[in-house]
Image: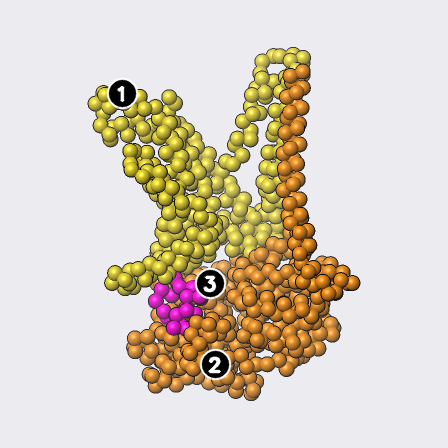
Amino acid sequence: MNKKMIIGLCLAMLMLLLAACGSGTNEPEATKDTNKGTEPAATAAGTKEEKVTLSFMHFKSDVTDGVAKIVEQFEAENPNITVEVQPVKYDDYYTLIKTKLAGGDIIDVFTLNPGGQTKLFADGGYIMDLTGQPFLANFDEDVLKGQATDGENYVMPVNGGPIAVFYNKKIFSDLGLEVPRTYDALIEAANKIKEAGKTPFALGWKDGWTLGMWASRDLPSLTALEEGQTDFFQKLEVGQAKFADNPAVKVTIERAKKLFELGNKDQLGVDYNGVVDLFSKGEVGMMYTGTWPLLDFEKKNPDFYNNDLGYFPYPFSNDEALNKLEFNPDASLAVASNTPHKEAALKFMEFMSSKQGGDAWVNNIKSLSYVKGSTTSIAPAMDELKPYFDQGLTYDSQIYFANTTLDWSTQFCQLLQQYFFNKTTPDKIIADMDDWISKNHK
Amino acid sequence: MENGCGWAGANVPLSRIFGGGAGMGLLRRTVKNEFWYVLFLVPGFSLFALALLIPLGMGIRYSFTDWDGIAQTLHYIGWGNYKNALTDNDLWKALLNTFKYAIILTIAVNCLSLLFALLLDSYLKFRNVFRTVFFLPSVISIVLSGFIWSYNYSTGLPKLFHFFGFENVTSPLGNPDHALFGIIIIAVWQGIGAPMIIYIAGLQGIPQELIESAKIDGAGTGRTLWNIVLPLLAPSFTINMVLTLTGSLKVFDLVFVTTHGGPAFATEVMSTYIYRSSFASYKGGYGMALSMIFFVVLVIVTIIQLSIFRRREVEI
């Protein structure tokens, strides 16, 4: 009798345990329900059609509020669609989204970089082919062609922007410096700034992407435009080319070291936000970056932002004719191929491609939109670049390795950092890189 | 390590069932009487299987493919990944960094927490306050303390030193020579709380009469400590050494939030290297193979360590 009671007790406890587990999974649903209960109050207007919740994941986490405002505009236009926005820091974005998709999660709409990343997702069958969708007519043919993967449009262009050099006009005029149009002039100006006791370059290389952003533009520009090896990176990926065969590599390595020496104190210890702060205080001469910090500059030092902030194209070459303005696509949008809300997702794309959507990207996050006819005036500093836009003097160095998936720049930057501290030599970096490539190419 | 307690109950009936030349009747009776022990194992074991065994099996499968981490089909390449790993210089560098980090950290954490435990077990005023203070960093999440310290290093400390007139103080995380030590300092700051509590508990478990009789025999503080306290503290020592060493070998979060393995690979540990191979270089299969190798290394280290320390323990 006693044994039976014990067994009974055990069973009862087990059931309790299972019940506890069960309630654990039930709980979120219950809270979700209560959420749903409160939400319709705001969107009660359109009750006839079914409510749809779209999930939208993006890597513009530095402008989370801006993107949220853009999405709000969309929601106001489409009361039946609620968009759940998930901003993710760029460094972790692709890891997270790959894990989510491979794990079977559905993210209806998400941002991608055109080129290698898009190809990877398209080849994996995760994103919808958008070719021929009516909303693509809102973009220039060239832009669409530039962002196509094997001739098909898997992503819709959204925004883009120049990557150039911000400079402090006050420091430049105090020292009587001209805006440099060649690489040598750039370094000469930097040296003069240093002699005057100021910091020439704001680097913020603690974040991996800041050094990577510079290296993955300087090297392809030099390789393709100065050395004429336009297919270098494609060949690299299949093992037909070597870093050792490309004289531009050594130039980039030496330039990186030069920048490091002319940079702010603690180059690898201060991150991007740190140098944005530093630069907006007006103590630094130049900063190589995209338009992203404009919002922060304006917030932190409006006086500097309106009067003393300038912007010039990065002169990678000593041949002035080659030094056009680097203009890169930023985020592009893709629709998941397994989305259950295809219609709503396409509506979202349609909105983003409209004039209103394009302007929303320009006004809220201070970047330029690819939508035809959207506005371009985003900051006083941008006016300096107007002649380049007007005369079409822009180029995109990223296309030279757009169709490769080799992440050479991360490895390259780590080796560069060894060189900054004299732990390696340029020749050793090149040998190491070739070693790494041979290990990694397919 | 985590699941050790789940198995304890099963040992008793098994030895009784198969021990000696008992007949079928006894076996049946034992099964009937003792079988319900197994019931207790079911929830624990199913969790263990779901969270550990099944993913491990899947991982082993992936480690024999050249999966890029995203494709939906698998292509088997046999032992290729393992062969590559053995000739991979970066792997050895990462392993070296991992062990450097783990060994320095284990020694530092254990020395410091033992010191604090001895101090806070004595008749100190406000000792409860101090115990709380030293334990507090352990309460913060590792990611948070990583952020706090990167800020401290890059902004806070240079400003502080500037105030005292020292210029050119830079973040250790920005220099390949110091970055690993910069991370170790954070880990020590955060890691001494839990071992300290275990040491304090161990100290309080030592019978007071042993110490008193040693004093009566004329032993000084140093001798008492060396011949009585430390030997009796050996079980706490074992558990703390094993826990901090295996924990620090597996470090990922702290390195990831503070340095991402940089600068110049100076803080690249095994788990960040595996992460980088799997996700940044699109070699999911290779990353899995590395994980398997690392798993074997961890198992070996733990077995060696346990066998060494268990031998030195003293029973009262």
Residue B38's mark?
A: none
Residue wearing tag 3? A208
- Disc 3 crowd rating (10 Å Cα; few below 14, some 14-19, many 20+) is many
| Residue B209 coordinates in the image, percent (x, y) | 31, 21
**Rendered location of residue B258, percent (x, y):** 43, 56
For the residue labelled by badge 3, is the local secondary structure a helix, a strand or a loop?
helix
A154 with respect to B12 (left or right): right
Give coordinates of residue A316: x percent, y percent: 46, 78
Describe the element under mark 1 as helix, strand or loop: helix
Q: CA distance from mark 1 to mark 3?
A: 62 Å
Q: Is residue A268 magenta?
A: yes
The answer to whether residue B243 is magenta is no
Looking at the image, which residue is at 74% across and 74% down?
A: A134
Which structural element holds mark 2?
Answer: helix
Compared across the picture, whether B60 is left or right of A297 comes to right
Identified by mark 1, the residue type is: Ser
Q: Which residue is mark 1?
A: B213
Q: Amino acid at mark 2?
A: Ala
Residue A275 visible at all: yes
